[in-house]
Each structure stands twice: as structure tokens, then as C-alpha cells.
Amino acid sequence: MPYIISEEARDLLSDVKKFCDNEVREQAKEFDKTGEWPKEMYDKAIEQGYTALEVPEEYGGVGLSRVDIAALMEEMAKADAGFATTVSASGLGMKPVLIAGNDEQKRRVCEKILEGSFAAFCLTEPGAGSDPGAGKTTAVKDGDSYILNGRKCFITNGAVADVYLVAALTNKELGMKGMSMFLVESGTPGLSTGNHEDKMGIRCSNTCDVVFDDCRIPAENLIGKEGDGFKIAMQTLDQARTWMGCLATGIAQRAMEEAVAYAKERIQFGKPIIKNQAMHFKIADMEIKIETARQMVAHALTKMDLGLPYSMESAIAKCYASDIAMQVASEAIQVFGGYGYSREYPVEKLLRDAKIFQIFEGTNEILRIVVGNNIVK
Ligand code: COS
């Protein structure tokens, strides 16, 4: 059963489905092989407004609820999780500004996204993954500017973004309490990209190092106040994790659909294998997991839409959906048998794509800490 969405979103959903069928689903197979970032495909998505779905209505966005957007994002993830990750990472990059920025900053970033720019959220560093408070990137105040130095890694959209939201220390002695958040625009001298990741999955998304070498930005690009950076980053991730749960659900849904279609065609012992009750049980277990994940995503997003606390629900949604995406993709391979292990068939890619969802935007181990802390507190 899909999300319960508005009439407007239903119309958009059928457009997204058509777009994904025509422009993404088949093409993504090739990009999975080459690992290229398909600019042409993304330009078409920008033209349709799909990269700006999360822009709030007051800043020129379409004004859909988060649950509405989830239905569209799941459809994109079903077609290709790398494509959906690129789109969603722009939403992630916008969040620090929407959470803590001033009106001018929000307007500036939203305008750029509406014009077709991508955003990137730069928190992780080589020595600061699960422990972002250990970050070493610095921002030193110099008159009306800050000068940034450091290296961020595993940054989605790192080489293709126009807007970077960067966590950097304005006071090294204070550690995470000395962390601040900055807006850096592409083309700023001292901003460059480094190592590009050759990834196991979501291969048509761009992931690379982002380097700051005496990168001077106007002081007005500070988001919130000095020292607010860690909390802004945590609030950003609190929201963003649900979206990763949504995408993981899309991968699982695709895996189940592929498994059902194959089981109807595959003849063994003189009948389609779908006729075996064992197959029904497999498919029922997949559906139970997928629908539970989807409802958890919807629940977390509804709480966000209503302004209720959602940190724990978001962690649960991402953690559960990514775990079941791995399970369902693996079971889909099992249904395909030997063919499922072959690159010729679509399901092995789904398993590779699903894996990262247990890792990024908070490993599932960290998310269990978040859930545990919420319960204990
Ligand atoms: N929202 C707002 N504030 C938060 C918060 C949240 N979700 N989580 C923590 N904070 C605040 C705390 O309230 C605390 O502030 P005070 O000292 O003023 O009370 C401060 O941040 C430090 O909190 P805490 O001591 O819990 O931080 P930890 O270093 O122990 O880290 C975890 C907590 C592990 C939850 C955090 O580091 C985390 O989420 N790590 C994973 C990071 C991640 O997802 N990286 C992947 C990025 S890919 S884009």
C-alpha cells in the first residue's frame, strides 16, 4: 500500500513514474557500469523541478507535505537509488540553512536550488565520521571574512554542487562546542574537490573529498551563531535520516517487484515457481517489512510536518528501512537463484545500492545509540 498523499502529489507521482521509466530506470544500468555522473539525466530532472521538491512554499517551492514528497522520492529510488540520493542530498544540503539560517540566506539558497543548482552537506572528515565532533576543519575570523582550511570526505554532490554547507571549528579549544556552520558557494577561491570515490553502489551519485585551502568567505555566510554548528548538524541529520529510510524502502519495493515478476515467469518442475507456497511466504515477508518501513517513514515525516519531536522516529525509520532493504534485496536474489547473482539481472545491483543506507547519515549502530538515548532519557 503506498503513502496516503494529496491529489496534487498523485498527479505529480504519475509524472515522476513516467520520467523514471523513460529517463532513469534503464539508463541507470549503464551508469552503474561506468560510474559516471550523468549530467544530461540530471538536467532533465532539474527541468521537471524534481531537485527542488524540498524548497518550502514561502521560498518558491511547490508546497507539498513531506509525506507527499516521500511518495515521489520512493519512486525515484525504485528507478535508481543513486539518482534519488543525488536529489535527496540537495535537500540535505539545504537543511542547515532552513533550520538555522536567516531569511536572506534561506532565500539565497532556495533560489539557487530552484535555478537548478545542487547542494552538498560537508560534515564528515577522514578522522571524523561517526564522531563529527572530532572534525579538524577550521574557520578563522579575519575582519569581515572567515578563512576555511580543511578536508571533508565522502561528500555526496561534492563535485557538482553550487552550494556547500560546511561545519568548521571557530574555536578549536572548545571541540564540538566550537563548531560553526557556513555557507560556501562554488567558485570561491580555495574551494576544490579531491579524491573521487569509486563506489560499490549508488554509482550515478557523485561522492568526493571537498577541500578548503585558505578559502575566504564573507562573515555573513555564518549560519546561526558561532558555536551552533554541531547542534545544527545534528538537527540536519535528524531530518535527513528519514529521507534515507524512504529511499531504502524504494530499493526494497523494487527488489520485491522484480522477485514477483521473475517468479511468475520462471518455470521449474513444470510450473511457475510463484505457485509454490514457499514463494508466497517469501513475498509476504518482504511486503510486511516494506510496508512497516514505509509507515515508519510516514510517521516520522508526519511528526516533522506537525512540528512534533522526531529525532528517534527518524533514526528508527532509517535504521529499520535500510536493514530490511538489505534483507529484501538478498531474498530477491534468492528468488532469482543463480541468475540473481549475475550482473545481467537487476537484483544484485539493488543489494549493492542498499548497503550504503546502513552506513551513511549515521551508521545503524550510531542510530541505535540515538534510539537508546531517547528511551533512557
Ligand atoms: N539535536 C540537537 N542537539 C543535539 C542532538 C540533536 N539530535 N544530538 C546531540 N545534540 C546536542 C546535545 O544536546 C549536546 O548539547 P549540550 O551539551 O548543550 O547539551 C551536544 O549536542 C553534544 O551531544 P552528545 O554529547 O550526545 O554528542 P555525542 O558526541 O555523544 O554524539 C551522536 C552523539 C553519536 C548521536 C552524534 O555524534 C552522531 O549523530 N553521530 C553520527 C554522525 C553522522 O551521522 N555522520 C554521518 C554524516 S553523513 S552526512
Image (cartoon, rainbow, N blue to C red):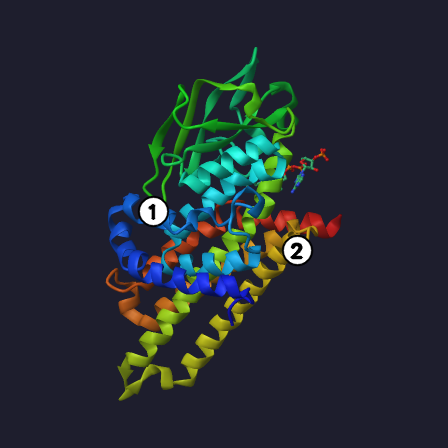
> Which amino acid, mark 2?
Lys
Between 24 and 284, which is closer to the camera in this rendering?
Answer: 24
Q: Residue at x 56, y 14 (%)?
A: 144
Quarter of the picture for ligand 1? top right
Q: Residue furthest right?
A: 377
Give the labeled residue for mark 1.
Answer: 42
Q: Position of residue 159 (x, y in %)?
A: 36, 34
Give the labeled residue for mark 2.
Answer: 303
Residue 163 makes an appearance in the image = yes
Horizontal arrangement in the rendering, residue 89 relative to residue 45 (left or right)? right
Horizontal arrangement in the rendering, residue 211 relative to residue 230 (left or right)? left
Instruction: Kindly state the secondary structure of the residue where label 1 is placed.
Output: helix
Mark 1 touching mark 2, by CB under 8 A? Answer: no
> Which amino acid, mark 1?
Tyr
318 versus 131 height, above or below: below
Instruction: Kindly state the secondary structure of the residue where label 2 is placed.
Output: helix
**Distance CA(mark 1)–CA(mark 2):** 31 Å
180 versus 244 height, above or below: above
Horizontal arrangement in the rendering, residue 352 relative to residue 303 (left or right)? left
Q: Position of residue 228 (x, y in %)?
A: 65, 30
Q: Position of residue 180 (x, y in %)?
A: 60, 27
Q: Residues within 10 Å of mark 1 (few under 14, many from 20)?
A: some
Q: How many marks?
A: 2
Residue 366 makes an appearance in the image = no
Q: Position of residue 209 (x, y in %)?
A: 40, 32
Q: Residue at x 40, y 60 (%)?
A: 16
352 versus 13 height, above or below: above
Q: Nearer the viewer, mark 1 or mark 2?
A: 1
Between 137 and 226, which is closer to the camera in this rendering?
Answer: 226
